């Protein structure tokens, strides 16, 4: 498997529980009908386990080799993937989840996101971009995307259009009509400059760290620069009011999934709830949460109660939100620890901060830094504070009990 390779609908990844495929629903939106078809296919051809990724994609697990083609056929028929494998492989845009609903968000952000995806996926030159190269389009409003681990961040807010490379303190400011062209030029500049770098960086953050952002903007011919700062993380769980109507407020309802995981049958029930209470769609977010839009205020308590009964996270301060974990064993062959079982144990304790339990140093669930990261090594854990899963642990060889003691966590 080449370095940096990513699975997609047509190119599954081998995992310990079978083959895993990744689905990228257009505009990060699922109609209730498409969600039910996906759920049915995930149960029929896979093991029924579905995961929401940090790029707002879906992973379906446990497929057999014979099941991949009929599963893909069903997903294309449901309208949530392209029939062309080359295009599907290159679709890598993180869409604003509510830009078409939230009046405070830039409505054109959704259109821009789709146009960028079409241009980058349809142009053969960009087949040379690393598989993990992604563009996030942030429309602001109640659910701004913020950093989300993308290589380029397009910010459409307050009447301005900014394009910020990951790790750069500056963004190129362009007119709304020039956004697509500017993204294309920056993607070309990335290919050009990363090829010329001795280290051949595969992510924007690494390239900017190597050469700085000035040569990067100059290569792209973009000289109108403006400072950018990270946006605060949005509240994603529970009632998210975004507009008034004659009888009160209307909004979305954020439903959190522990570890971003759900069963196919849960997805089918959530699709029913989206139809019963909302506008009949489910929006995928990069925050281990789905949002059902078009909910009227007086229906929110009933939806909260029904979703909570399903085990879905409906309160923003639910302690399960504080723990991030990849599948670990037995789902992933690279793991030596059952990361999710250990993380579930930790979520019952009083955690001082966000805690990431990673099956190995790759850090699939959260490649970035976390206040505390426990990394599986040979069946035990390494402890990293304020670092990434690949960093050197300050303590190693810990049992889970020893890790809990080292963190001073109480029950
Ligand atoms: S972080 Fe390691 S153990 Fe966890 S899913 Fe990724 S490769 Fe597997």
Image (cartoon, rainbow, N blue to C red):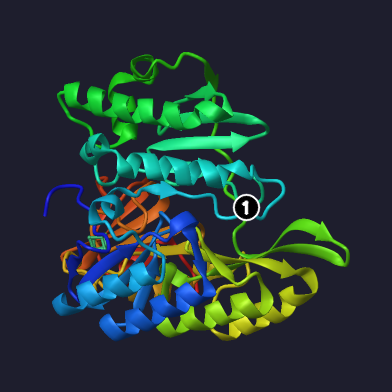
Q: Position of residue 136 (x, y in %)?
A: 45, 43
Q: Position of residue 322 (x, y in %)?
A: 50, 63
* Labels in figure, total: 1
Q: In the rendered view, does 354 fall on the left or right side of 366?
A: right
| SS label for mark 1 | loop
Q: Is residue 323 left or right of residue 301?
A: left
Comparing 313 with 254, the one in front is 254
Q: Relative to 165, does residue 146 appear above or below in the rendering?
A: below
Q: Position of residue 296 (x, y in %)?
A: 76, 69
Residue 342 seen in this snapshot: no
Q: Is residue 226 above or below residue 100?
A: above
Q: Position of residue 200 (x, y in %)?
A: 18, 30
Q: Residues within 10 Å of mark 1 (few under 14, many from 20)?
A: some
Q: Residue at x 55, y 20 (%)?
A: 226
Q: Which residue is mark 1?
A: 100
Q: Is residue 132 in view?
A: yes
Q: In this view of the protein, which residue sits in the foreground, 319 or 40?
A: 40
Residue 254 falls in which quadrant of the image?
Answer: bottom right
Name the residue: 41% across, 47% down. Answer: 93
- Check the image and report above or below for 106 versus 382: above
Nearer-the-camera pick, 167 or 264: 264
Examine the rendered structure and indicate whether residue 177 appears above or below residue 409.
above
User: Which residue is rendered at x = 57% and y = 24% of the image?
Assistant: 175
Q: Residue at x 46, y 79 (%)?
A: 36
Q: Which quadrant is the N terminus positioned in? A: bottom left
């Amino acid at each position: 498997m080449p370095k940096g390779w990513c699975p997609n609908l047509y190119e599954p990844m081998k995992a310990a529980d079978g083959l895993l495929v990744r689905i990228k629903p257009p505009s990060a939106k699922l109609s209730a009908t498409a969600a039910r078809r996906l759920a049915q296919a995930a149960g029929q051809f896979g093991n029924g386990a579905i995961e929401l990724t940090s790029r707002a994609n879906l992973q379906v697990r446990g497929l057999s080799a014979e099941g991949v083609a009929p599963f893909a056929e069903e997903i294309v028929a449901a309208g949530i993937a392209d029939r062309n494998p080359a295009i599907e492989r290159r679709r890598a845009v993180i869409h604003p989840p509510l830009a078409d609903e939230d009046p405070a968000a830039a409505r054109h952000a959704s259109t821009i996101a789709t146009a960028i995806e079409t241009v980058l996926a349809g142009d053969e030159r960009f087949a040379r971009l690393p598989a993990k190269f992604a563009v996030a389009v942030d429309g602001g409003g109640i659910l701004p995307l913020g950093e989300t681990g993308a290589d380029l961040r397009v910010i459409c807010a307050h009447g301005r259009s900014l394009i910020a490379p990951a790790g750069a303190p500056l963004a190129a400011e362009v007119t709304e009509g020039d956004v697509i062209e500017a993204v294309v030029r920056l993607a070309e500049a990335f290919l050009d400059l990363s090829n010329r770098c001795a280290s051949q960086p595969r992510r924007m953050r690494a390239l900017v760290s190597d050469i700085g952002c000035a040569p990067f903007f100059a290569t792209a011919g973009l000289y109108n620069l403006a400072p950018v700062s990270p946006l605060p993380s949005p509240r994603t769980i529970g009632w998210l009011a975004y507009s008034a109507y004659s009888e009160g407020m209307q909004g979305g309802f954020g439903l959190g999934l522990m570890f971003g995981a759900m069963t196919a049958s849960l997805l089918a029930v959530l699709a029913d709830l989206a139809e019963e209470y909302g506008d009949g769609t489910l929006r995928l977010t990069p925050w281990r949460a789905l949002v059902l839009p078009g909910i009227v205020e007086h229906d929110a308590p009933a939806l909260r109660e029904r979703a909570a009964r399903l085990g879905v996270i409906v309160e923003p301060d639910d302690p399960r939100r504080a723990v991030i974990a990849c599948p670990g064993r037995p789902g992933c062959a690279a793991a030596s620890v059952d990361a999710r079982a250990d993380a579930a144990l930790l979520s019952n304790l009083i955690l001082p901060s966000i805690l990431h339990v990673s099956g190995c140093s790759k850090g699939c669930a959260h490649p970035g830094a976390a206040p505390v990261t426990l990394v599986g090594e040979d069946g035990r854990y390494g402890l990293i504070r304020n670092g990434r899963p690949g960093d050197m642990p300050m303590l190693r060889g810990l049992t889970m009990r020893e890790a809990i003691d080292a963190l001073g966590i109480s029950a």
